[in-house]
Image (cartoon, helix red, strand yellow):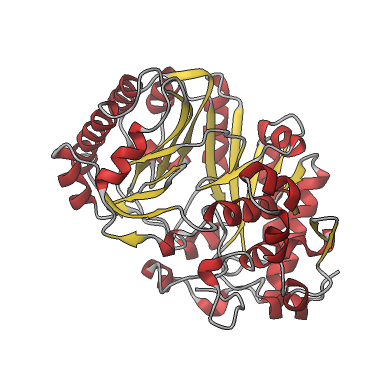
Amino acid sequence: MQTLTQLRRLGLFDARVPRYTSYPTALHFKPGFSPDTAANWIQAIPAGDTVSLYVHIPFCRRLCWFCACRTQGTATAEPVAAYLESLKTELATIKGLVAPGVKIEHLHWGGGTPTLLQPDMITDLTAAILDTMPLAENAQFSVEIDPSEVDDARLDALAAAGMNRASIGVQDFDPMIQEVIGRPQSYEITKQTVDGLRARGITSLNMDILYGLPHQNQARITDSVEKLISLGPDRVALFGYAHVPWMARRQNLIPTEALPSAEERLELFNTARDMFLDAGLVEIGIDHFALPDDGLATAHKAGTMRRNFQGYTEDTSQVLIGVGASSISRYPQGYAQNEPATAKYQAAARAGNLSVSKGHAFGGDDWVRSRIIELILCDFKVDFAQVAQELHDDVTRLVSMADGLADAMPDTFDLSDNVLTIHEASRPLARIIARHFDAYEMNAAGHSQAV
């Protein structure tokens, strides 16, 4: 087992270590990326193929202080209605580019607060999406739901739209912690939302909880996890709070002196982890837990689990199209990110153009390094021979990418017969081990470093 000193030295508690929901990470996307390139990539999607579609709703009635996502506050529905019209125009532009017969395998609405949309807006947006591309058979349609910003009418509209998986952010149920992070959300209102979802036949439920929040201790996280488990989620994400006020200025409202120490963060994680395992969930990757019959658990067991901007997924589509301000699309050819400023996004969308402002075209070792990093994060194991066969590369060359890892991360993995396996006790270090294969975060001396 790695000691806490080793974990700290190796950077386990460094918020700058990437989560690798993409490779390269969004920090390395280049500005001035051509929307025509993204349009060509959409046109290259084979007829009859399946894609995933992500819809970003950046608006929130309240801005949670802990959040580092691209969001903006609104007190009225007018900006949301105007934004919805831009989304519909962007979807119409995509419809004119995509080949016949392409269907949506996974549809996800994120934010922000998607449930800030009024019922008629939910219906309108769904119609625009389905007019662009139909849902595939057995498609998954998930929506991020804020229990403090949803009612029966909106739950009815979401159910009628075809939502079959809900995602609820809990963060922490302790009232004092909620006040400190700017996220009031009682257990009672959360349970009311869960009951409302199940009454409408939506039984697939994801929930998120954070460790490492200010004033969080063993008693508080134990109480919060007990309450979360009582709601019976199919899937749980246990994320470590990343305090990055240089990236998210609102985090300056969070008292740094109240943040748990490195030792306390590790204890908080282990406490929550043990409780989820005792409740019958299985551990998946670095931060997820799921019931054994959940789709993610099944994909993990079969070795088909993938990693994208939503974290771990059973989604097998090679294309993820992001619509809305700041959304990121992933194609076999590379990444394309929409303009993050809402006004600029809307101006481009309403002109009938894709609003892409940043991106990255795959080249060099991008494909193989991306696959190696994904396997490390998903399976804690890389069969270099299998990767070489899959991507038509040389196994000896791929194995050589691990040169220097034993010195940088001693006693954390085995490498034999062209297979790298991370020790079970060292799995918390998976992101740091993955960073060794990240060519964009290597300094001149050849050592990985956080950006």
Looking at the image, residue 419 sits to the left or right of residue 320; the answer is right
Looking at the image, residue 226 sits to the left or right of residue 29; the answer is right
Residue 410 lies, in percent from the top left, at: 80, 75
Quarter of the image containing the N terminus? bottom right
Residue closer to the observer: 87 or 115: 87
Residue 142 lies, in percent from the top left, at: 50, 32
Q: Picture quarter containing residue 175?
A: bottom right
Residue closer to the observer: 154 or 401: 401
Looking at the image, residue 405 sits to the left or right of residue 329; the answer is right
Looking at the image, residue 158 sits to the left or right of residue 303; the answer is left
**Residue at (65%, 62%) from the top-left corner?**
434
**31 over 411 or under it: above or below:** above
Q: How many dots with numbers?
A: 0
Residue 221 lies, in percent from the top left, at: 68, 58
**Residue at (58%, 48%) from the top-left corner?**
208
**Residue at (39%, 43%) from the top-left corner?**
113
Q: Can residue 49 be seen from the camera position used here?
A: yes
**238 over 428 or under it: above or below:** above
Q: Can residue 238 be seen from the camera position used here?
A: no
Residue closer to the observer: 75 or 109: 109
Residue 76 lies, in percent from the top left, at: 22, 43
